[in-house]
Amino acid sequence: MVPCLVRLAAARKSNDTMPRFAANLSMLFTEVDFTERFAMARAAGFVGVEYLFPYAYPKDLLGQMLSDNQLTQVLFNLPPGDWGAGERGIACLPDRVEEFRAGVDQAIDYAGALGCRTVNCLAGLKPATLSEDIAWQTLEDNVTWAAGKLAEQDITLCLEAINSRVDMPGFLLDTSGKVLALIEAVDADNVRLQYDLYHMQIMEGDLVRSMECLLPWIGHIQFADNPGRHEPGTGEINFSNVFAAIDRMGYEGWVGAEYRPTGATGASLGWFSGQG
């Protein structure tokens, strides 16, 4: 873990407020078709939504869903390669650079249409035959190029650390320290860490202290309980304390509910009082 470079006032915000929560429509409200999930999220009290990828749907349709339901598009990912075939990002693959760059252009097109100011880059799984040094340099070069293109549109580029123990063995960026090293190497003002509580509980733990130290670099937060990646209250994370800490430390971004409900989505929202 990198040294804590800041100490935050514990009472920066009132204790009776909570973070801004966004519903991840790739995981929540899956009882209905994707385009119907926007209305369900709004009815549940969410004012922001995120999801893995928008590219299977026309921009105009997604924009209409956001407008009709008065929702903010908070985040989506750059194209990941062939997700159905198990690819989890192509940013570290030297033979896919042109595809990566085309994907950045596609993401910019969608972000402009949807009013989305933040996109996330999945580093990808490093093939066993690819050296660590080449994978890292490819990732650094791709992120540097993408950051420049996105900065022209005033879009923030997030980099997510994903656990390599349970969900994605071989994922190149699996700790917050690795993401910060990449951010330092790229040295662009619009590059930030996407901090996922579920993944970082598995890889690092000490969530509250870690977020306090990493706050200057955090551009987005996501959560699910561990183990199982289900809703708060199903695992080991004390979400009442974690959410209160996020609020106290003065984080002003969005917090995405990216979990798999154990039953109907509505029954999993006991942690959420609604913000609509």
Image: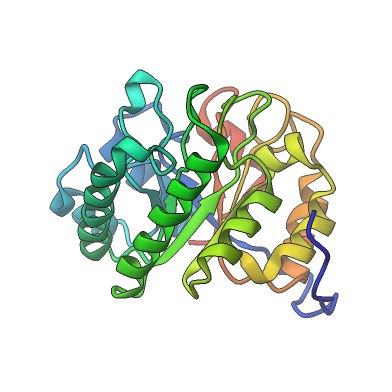
Q: Nearer the viewer, residue 1 or 184?
A: 184
User: Residue 66 falls in which quadrant of the image?
Assistant: bottom left
Q: How is the image coloured?
A: rainbow
What percent of the width, then of the height, locates residue 115? 29, 66
Left or right: residue 270 versus residue 9 is left
Q: In the displayed structure, would residue 108 be above or below residue 29?
A: below
Residue 254 appearing in the image:
no
Is residue 171 visible in the rendered image? The answer is yes
Residue depicted at x 58% and y 32% = 267
Query: For the image shown, how many numbered marks are present on the structure?
Result: 0
Question: What residue lies at 60% left-to-right and 23% top-to-bottom?
Answer: 262
Q: Nearer the viewer, residue 181 or 118?
A: 181
Q: With respect to residue 10, does 217 lie above or below?
A: above
Quadrant hosting residue 145: bottom left
| Residue furthest top in the image | 85
The answer to whether residue 34 is left or right of residue 208 is left
Position of residue 200 in the picture relative to residue 276 (left or right): right
For residue 127, side relative to residue 225 (left or right): left
The residue depicted at 84 percent of the width and 76 percent of the height is 7
- Where in the figure is residue 178, as x and y percent of width and height? 65, 50
Could you tell me residue 207's position as x and y percent? 79, 50
* Residue at the image point whose x is 81% and y is 33% from the top: 236
- x, y percentage for residue 259? 57, 35
